[in-house]
Amino acid sequence: MFKLDNKVAIVTGSGSKKGIGRTIALTLAEQGATVVVADLNLDGIADTVTAIKEAGGTAYGVELNVTSQASVDTMVEEVLSEFGRIDILINNAGISQKVTVEDMTIEDITKVFNVNMFGLFLCTQAVLKPMKEQKFGRIVSLSSVSAKRGGGVFGGAHYSASKAAVLGFSKNLAREVALDGITVNCVAPGLVNTDIWKLLPEELASNVIAGIPMGRPGETEEIAAAIAFLASEEASYITGEEIDINGGSHMD
């Protein structure tokens, strides 16, 4: 089940070792997808591509700045030229910033929204035409538990707002493209065991863990597994949904 053979998947922000994008890319490749590793970090792209190939998968690296229309369009054109199709888009690229509303600047808000929402919009819009033409597509975007419970771990209000915008955008888009064979869903991770989590002060980390009924952070593989399911044929009747993956720290 959940095999992705003959599917071409773009994973944005999958060059960084700090987040979950690399695990997502590896997981999709393990399921048989040809994975396009798209990131600003050229060294990170090379590392992820190498890791996929060493594991027996197929990968292709593309430099991508999600905040640039030209960069996004070039990436999509390159992928279509190389493979002739785009089946899956995983909108993983994102940034955060810990700052209070009182201290926040318009530049702070703009920077976070440019990546987390506007960059996601550019990438999503760019793949819709080829997906509509082939009457198949899977778009999975990463929101956050912060979008639903109002922060509490890393980001400020602008981060929570940007991730909430991802949910609203995705639900509306799901309605627009449902008859084109395209599903649009989100995952909303809670605390995940990445290098970023390890930067938290010990006292704050303990407080965060205390608020998770399962008593631990999630693993990147647990997030990637849900994404692989949503990208599969078996999830063909699921659209406009978000899957909360947070160990019980937020339930609705």
Image (cartoon, rainbow, N blue to C red):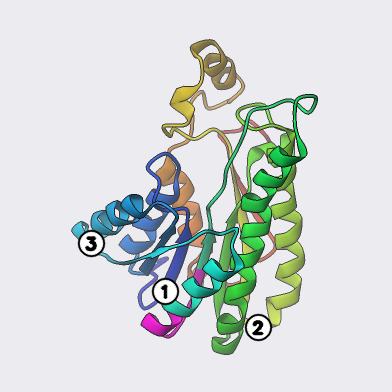
Whole-number angstrom distance, CA of label 1 to CA of label 2: 18 Å
Residue located farthest toward the right when viewing the structure as drawn: 102
Image vertical order of residue 94 relative to residue 169, above or below:
above
**Circle 1 Cα neighbour tier, 10 Å, few/some/many (<14 / 14–19 / ≥20):** many
Which quadrant, please, contains the N terminus? bottom left
Under mark 2, the amino acid is: Asp
Whether residue 232 is visible to the viewer of this picture, yes or no, is: yes
Q: Which residue is mark 2?
A: 180
Magenta range is 80-88
- Which label's residue is closer to the chain start, 3 or 1? 1
Asked if the magenta segment contains residue 23, the reply would be no
The answer to which of 194 and 158 lies nearer the viewer is 158
Q: How far is mark 3 from mark 2, CA to CA?
A: 33 Å
- In the shown orientation, is residue 186 left or right of residue 77? right
Labels 1 and 2 touching (C-beta < 8 A): no
Q: Is residue 85 magenta?
A: yes
Q: State the image coordinates of residue 133 (x, y, percent, origin top left).
A: 58, 89
Q: Is residue 145 above or below residue 230?
A: above
Q: Earlier in the sequence, mark 1 or mark 2?
A: 1
41 relative to 215 in the view: left or right: left
Of badges 1 and 2, the one in the foreground is 1
Query: Horizontal and vertical percent for residue 49?
Result: 29, 59
Amino acid tagged 1:
Val
Q: Which residue is mark 3?
A: 53
